[in-house]
Amino acid sequence: MQLTTFGNDVMLGDSVQATVGAFTVKVSARVDFEAPTDEMLRVMAIPDRFSFIAQLEAEVWIAVNGYQIRVPEARVIRHGMIVNDPSNQHLDEAATVLAQSALSKAMHMAGSFAEAA
């Protein structure tokens, strides 16, 4: 699986994705409501840098008869990711791990559905 990359200036809502067969995996940077306040203040206190703490959320869709169907049970989240500090290579690495985990869950579930049918 080859994910796109976040780049150097990530904003909330930015995402990377990959397609593997009928599956599409998307990893997005979202607001991390569970981030500790003291950690957020530490990151925000760095001058001349727009850094923040986000959560990465991996979601999977499967293509069935031309429709994209989301597999909500395959969602995987990682909290406490520092963004734009100073690069985002660590985000790309974490996104790859999350995407692989979510894809594995979705493929396992799709196999279970096929066996049940």
Image (cartoon, helix red, strand yellow):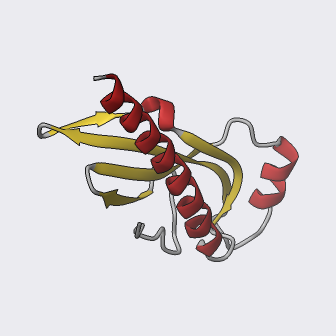
Q: Residue furthest right?
A: 38
Q: Picture quarter containing residue 96?
A: bottom right
Q: Residue furthest top?
A: 116
Residue 82 lies, in percent from the top left, at 70, 60
* Residue appearing at x 60%, y 68% in the figure: 93
* Residue appearing at x 63%, y 65% in the figure: 50
Quadrant of the drawing holding the N terminus: bottom left
Q: How many marks?
A: 0
Q: Residue furthest front?
A: 115
Pick the front one: 82 or 60: 60
Query: Horizontally, is 34 left or right of 96 in the view?
Result: right
Residue 55 lies, in percent from the top left, at 63, 47
Residue 83 lies, in percent from the top left, at 64, 62
Give above or below for 61 relative to 22.
above
Quadrant of the drawing holding the C terminus: top left
Pick the front one: 99 or 48: 99
Give above or below for 32 relative to 69.
below
Give above or below for 50 relative to 8.
above
Q: Picture quarter containing residue 62?
A: top left
Q: Picture quarter containing residue 3?
A: bottom left
Query: Horizontally, is 58 left or right of 38 in the view?
Result: left
